[in-house]
Structure formats: C-alpha cells, structure tokens
Amino acid sequence: MLGIIAATAAAALAAPVAGLFAHRAVRRSAHARLMRIDAPNGIDEQGFVRIGGIDQWISVRGEDRANPVLLEVHGGPGAANSPYGARTRAWEEHFTLVRWDMRGAGLTFAHGGPAGQGGEPSFERLYADALEVVHHVRERLGTDRVVLMPSSFGTVFGLRLARNHPELFSAYVGTDQNVLDAGRDTSAYDATLERLRAAGKAKDAAGLEAMGSDPNRWTSAQRSAYDKLCTGSDPLTLDTVKKVVLGSMWLSPLYSPGRIAAYFKGQAFSEPVTVGTHGFDDRADGTRFEVPFFVFQGALDVITPAARAKAYFDEVEAPVKAFALIEDASHFAALHRPDRFLELLLAHVRPVVAGGRAASAAG
C-alpha cells in the first residue's frame, strides 16, 4: 500500500506550506494534551526495547494497570500503528494498549534506519520478534496472558501465534482479517479488475491482468502495485487512507516530517516480507484454536473482503467465538470507526478475558 499512501501524502503537502504547518502545530498540541494519562494506577511508557538484537519501539498505555492487556500486531508490512494514539485514546480507559512498531516499520525504522534493522526483514524474523515482544509485555505487566489483536497483514502472524502458543493469549481479536489460501480465492483481485474497467482505466486493468490472480507468483514490487490499484480504485478506502492514515500521521505528536518520510521508506524496506508467505494456507494449517476467537471486519473492505473472513471464521472451532461487521467501513475499520470497534471489544471481548472464562477454557 506504499504507493497510494506516498502519492496521497505528496498531494497533501502541495497545499500552502505556512498555513498547513500552523494548523498542524495547533492540532498536534491538542493531541498531546489528549494523550496525557494522569490516573494514579495508569501507565504511559513509550520508548525503545531491545528485541531481536535491535532497538524496537514499544508503547504501553492505559488508565488502569488492572485492565486486560491488548497487544496490537500491525499490518503492511511496514504499516506501523504508532500514529493512531489520538484516534484510539478511549480504548485506554478499558484496556492497557500495547503498540509495537516492527523492525522495518514506523518509529523502529526511523530510529535505526536501514542499517539498524538487523538485515533484510523476513516473515520468520518478524514472527520471532513478535514472540519476544509477547514475553516482554507479560513480564513487564505481570500478566500470564494478553489479548492478541492483529490487523491486516498482521493477522498472518496473529493466526500462527494464537494457534501455536495458546498459553500466551487470553483471546484472539482479528480485524482487517487476512485469510491466505494458497491463491484459491481471487475475489478481491476480480473486484479490483472490475472497478478499474468500470472506471475506464484500461492500462491499469491490462497491467493487473498481466500479473495474474495468484499472489504467490507476484514479486514484492508487484504486490505493492496491486495494493495501490486495489486501494486507489475504491473511493471509501482511498478516503480512509487520506483522512485516517495520513491525517493521523500528520497530526501525531510522535511524528515529525522526518519521521513521516521514514515511515514510507520503512514500508518500501519491508516489502520483501510478503514473499515469505507464499504458499501459506490458513485452512490447511488448522482451524481449531484453543483461545476465544473474534473477528471484527469492515463490511465494505475491498482489500481483505468480509465474505472471505466470514467464511474462514465459520470453519473455526474455539471455546468462544464471535464475528461482527463494522458498518460503513472498508480496510482500517478499527481506526476508521474506533468508537464502534470499542463497543465490540466491550460487548464481546472484555467480558471473556476479564471474567476468567478464557483461562478456564484454555486450561
């Protein structure tokens, strides 16, 4: 998704510079005030932790340390969630929210640059990092289990973490849920091709046809090109990228213009990670999970379609499970509708993980 985000950012920065930066300064200051945590039992720790031999950015924030711990695994690859603090501030009243910028992503990439990432990132290396982060969070917060909340490409890690290590997690909460099936389901590709043709973009459609529908045959550059066409051809998704993704980054107190530039460079640096998932088959790997299993999906998601996520969810066996659609949302559903997402967390997830049912079911 690098291409469409970078292109949209360039267009935004073409606005009158003085007014743009003045408005930004006011909004960033307001967001900084919003992000303050003064509760006596609260926690606000943001900084770098040694994970996998390099410094990686981790944020731990919440109003009450007694709340359940919610660990995000962001998507992309390289699409860190560190810019979204203001959008999800209300979540921290009910959960201790842990955000981690993977190697090659966000503030981790901005801090170390390409040379400080420990070599080219791979799926296996990031998976090992994720496990180390889980153990770090459990030790730091004194909790046996955490709620695992991956999004988009992060769900590729998330499914494997939850399946392989149920002892570490009180629940799985997927959003923008990705389901890899060795290239059998071509619905998102087919819909993208149809949108391009309907819009009269014959050249883009021909290029997409030439790539073929099997993502396992794409290079990392071709996958990035597909993401650009898929996102850019859907008005709702494109609008979400502009307002939610770029808007959050631009107004985040954590992101200077230099860090914004590094964010995009990190996404380009992280592109090769997708090659390591070629041939993955989530159904073949097993649909039995020993933890409560939840999926909250954008009803209008064109990148990871809701119908595909629901079909997989229906095959899942778990101690507790629930699926819900987030209305009027495409990809980035949790961030586009953080209020609705919190409602779902409170209705379905928090009663399970706070009431001990997850521990007894998995034990």
Image (cartoon, rainbow, N blue to C red):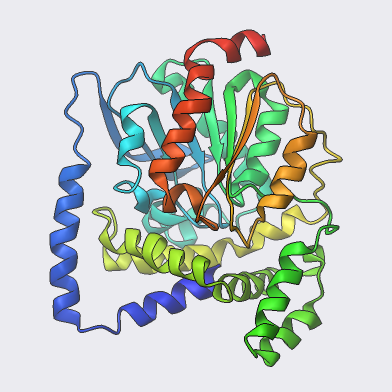
Q: Which quadrant is the N terminus positioned in?
A: bottom right
Residue 61 seen by the camera: no
Question: In the image, what residue occupies the spot 46% across and 40% down?
Answer: 341
In the picture, measured across the screen, residue 62 lies left or right of residue 104, that is left
Residue 155: name its quadrant.
top right
Question: In the image, what residue occupies the spot 66% across and 73% down?
Answer: 226
In the picture, measured across the screen, residue 167 lies left or right of residue 4, that is right
| Image spot of residue 267 (x, y percent) | 52, 64
Q: Is residue 144 above or below residue 174?
A: above
In the picture, measured across the screen, residue 344 lies left or right of residue 212, that is left
The residue closer to the viewer here, 231 or 282, is 231
Residue 25: name its quadrant.
bottom left
Q: Which quadrant is the C terminus positioned in?
A: top right
Q: Is residue 264 above or below residue 94?
A: below
Residue 240: name its quadrant.
bottom left
Residue most extreme to the front: 327
Q: Is residue 24 above or below residue 296?
A: below
| Image spot of residue 167 (x, y percent) | 64, 18
Q: Is residue 310 above or below residue 206?
A: above
The residue closer to the viewer here, 348 or 357, is 348
Question: In the image, what residue occupies the spot 45% across and 20% down?
Answer: 139
| Image spot of residue 271 (x, y percent) | 61, 64
Residue 104 seen by the camera: yes
| Image spot of residue 350 (x, y percent) | 47, 22
Q: How many marks?
A: 0
